[in-house]
Amino acid sequence: MTFSISARCARTGEFGIAVSSSSPAVAARCAHARAGAGAVATQNITDPTLGPKGLDLLACGLSAQAALERLCAEAPHIEYRQLAMVDRAGGTAAFSGSRTLGVHRTVQGPGVVAAGNLLRAPSVPDAMVAAFLAAPDEPLAVRLLAAMRAAVAEGGEEGPVHSAGLLLVRDVAWPVADLRVDWHETDPIGALAGLWDRWAPQMDAYVTRALNPSGAPSYGVAGDRGQ
């Protein structure tokens, strides 16, 4: 039903998640990240409250493994949940409850963790992590999207995926990218990559407009005269 990849960029300190599913609007429920704290993917029979709870634990300084253990000890119905976490040091942790659906697997690497359920092949998360680690000098979003394409090439879900999302946080208090394809009949991951290509050249300008409007570039919209 869902596959995701969560990661920290060792060069920039950014955190990011990319996720896709056969169900609509997957990123709204499953992708959670906070600047300076970490990233949490919560999926399978999803409990969206586990994302913010996990981020609160990471923000208090717990490692990904310690935060995961706390969540698993306290959350109801944990046997239905699948979780993946990355902490501020790049540590990772993952969990698949005993009621996780279908073929499922989690794979961890340096600063990255992939998780999936109802997969066509158990090797899907392995392919995601390998694709992510293969391009360490690329921007975090590019590496996450490469991992998502690798998941599809490896077989992806048992059925077709219809939604996808990309969430990035860095040195400001809001996500610098929160891109979502909430429903697409044929290729939500391709559509998400297209959104990233459109957003990436403008992303830093939107940060500057929030922090220092007087120093921001022109808005590039009808009626804007650069004043």
Image: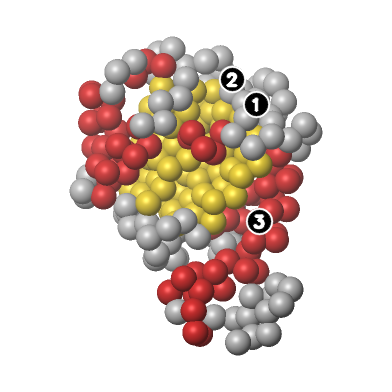
Mark 1 Cα-neighbour bin, 10 Å: few <14, some 14–19, many ≥20: many
For this orientation, the residue located farthest to the front is 223
Q: Measure the alpha-carbon separation of dots 2 and 1.
A: 10 Å
Q: What secondary structure is marked by label 3?
A: helix
- Asked if marks 2 and 1 touch (Cβ < 8 Å), the reply is yes
Q: Measure the alpha-carbon separation of dots 1 and 3.
A: 21 Å
Could you tell me which residue is drawn at 67 percent across and 20 percent down?
Answer: 158
For this orientation, the residue located farthest to the right is 186
Could you tell me which residue is drawn at 73 percent across and 35 percent down?
Answer: 184
Q: Is residue 72 left or right of residue 184?
A: left
Could you tell me which residue is drawn at 73 percent across and 53 percent down?
Answer: 194
Amino acid type indicated by mark 2: Leu
Q: Observer-nearest residue: 213 or 45?
A: 213
Quarter assignment of residue 92: top left
Q: Which residue is mark 1?
A: 22
Amino acid type indicated by mark 3: Trp
Q: Which residue is mark 3?
A: 196
For this orientation, the residue located farthest to the top is 99
Nearest to viewer (mark 2 / mark 1): 1
Q: Observer-nearest residue: 58 or 66?
A: 58
Q: Observer-nearest residue: 126 or 149?
A: 149
Q: Is residue 14 above or below residue 93?
A: below
Q: Quadrant of the C terminus?
A: bottom right
Could you tell me which residue is drawn at 47 percent across and 44 percent down?
Answer: 6
First along the sequence among labels 1 and 3: 1
Quarter assignment of residue 160: top right
Q: Which residue is mark 2?
A: 118
Does any portion of residue 126 appear in the rendered image? no
Amino acid type indicated by mark 1: Ser
Q: Find residue 58 and report its horizontal and vertical position in percent.
A: 27, 46
